[in-house]
Image: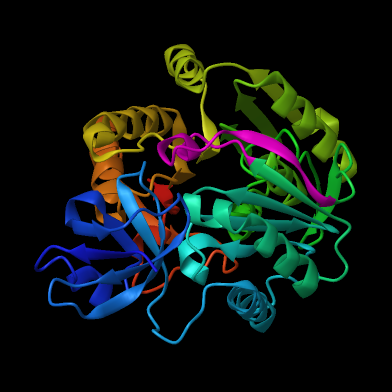
Amino acid sequence: MIKIILKKGKEKSLLRRHPWVFSGAVDSVSGEAAPGETISVQSADGSFLGFGAWSPHSQIRCRIWSFERTDVIGPEFFRARIDAALALRRAHGSDIPLRACRVVNAENDGLPGLIVDRYGDFAICQFLAAGPEYHKDTIVAALTHAMPGLRGVYERSDADVRIKEGLPVFSRLLWGEEPPETIDIDELGVTFRVDVRNGHKTGFYLDQRDNRRLVGAYARGREVLNCFCYTGGFGVWALAGGAAHVLNIDTSGPALDMARANVRANGLDMDRVQFMEADVFKALRAFRDEGRTFDLIVLDPPKFVDSKQALDRACRGYKDINLLAFQILRPGGTLFTYSCSGLMDDDLFQKVVAGAALDAGRQASIIHRIGQAPDHPVRLSFPEGRYLKGFAIHVE
């Protein structure tokens, strides 16, 4: 087996069970490995550290599959990891009766670079790194073994992160039947229609499940503004919770069409909801200038930052959008604000939002700290896994 030797002192993160080896930590490589091939990682003194997937085109040069010398990275290994991931969800009730759940959450389930979401009888996969790409056939076989009721396994390997791995981007059927145009899922009694072939990520933001329900609990009798609404998840829950009116805003016409379908699928009153195709920043500025206000605002923007170099710019973006929200929120109102940028930690995000409240001249208090749903677990040794964070904020 090919092995890499780390520079002296660079083994510390692996000894803490962090699964990434960056290019700058590598001192030498013995032989040549194909992208995704399993290699052995050793410290400068020759001590075994783990088995990982080689990724010569990425700054993350190796992602660790296992820290155990006795493990063999093959079919039984992947079966065991996927079985363990499913067992974790079942133990916490994440997969039953929802039939819509994250089955594999990459590094947090010991399978770096692999995302698997289940919608009904279909598994939708993202192979985001060289390792899972190399073992794709083995992984698909393990999924169909672990979930015998599956009708199809569909690949959504169309994320830009694959380019950094030197991999092409595409979507295709891997096994079984093609998924239908939309799949209906049940989320705690609310129905959503999901386009798994063309929608964002794998089709839906399962990580916001509990947060959507929380918005519904605060919505009764309120006028709600749902920004970056995508297919209207927060808006549907707000309507189901008794909102007086909901305005959904997104830049995508097709996403808004799906949002309308989701309102209809739940038998909700279309007279209490409006859909606006617009740039959210521009729309909020227009509301501020015309004096339009709301009782409850949801800010769930796309990721603003994908590198440390872009963090300052992202902070400005988050501050601008939260400042606008504070300016159009009525006294006694509630702001639900989120960041899905992994490089934006909780403390920094709170500082950014606090700065926006200060500039808006509003006194505000955090009433809920918000994260991702339990089927998106975070390993203690991999804090980067907690990418979604947010606050429910009461404004005086």
Q: Is residue 388 above or below residue 163?
A: below
In depth, the one of 324 and 118 nearer the eye is 118
The quarter of the rendered structure image containing the C terminus is: top left
**Residue 250: percent from left, percent from top:** 61, 25
Describe residue 187's horizontal placement relative to residue 335 as left or right.
Answer: right
Q: Is residue 183 visible?
A: yes
Task: Give the quadrant of residue 253.
Answer: top right
**Residue 152: percent from left, percent from top:** 84, 54
Magenta stretch: includes residue 160: yes
Task: Give the quadrant of residue 248.
Answer: top right
Residue extending furthest left?
8
* Residue stretch in magenta: 157-175
x 85%, y 62%: residue:
150
In depth, the one of 198 and 240 nearer the eye is 198
x 30%, y 45%: residue:
59
Describe residue 121's horizontal placement relative to residue 38 as left or right.
Answer: right
**Residue 215: percent from left, percent from top:** 60, 51
Describe residue 245's horizontal placement relative to residue 250 as left or right.
Answer: right
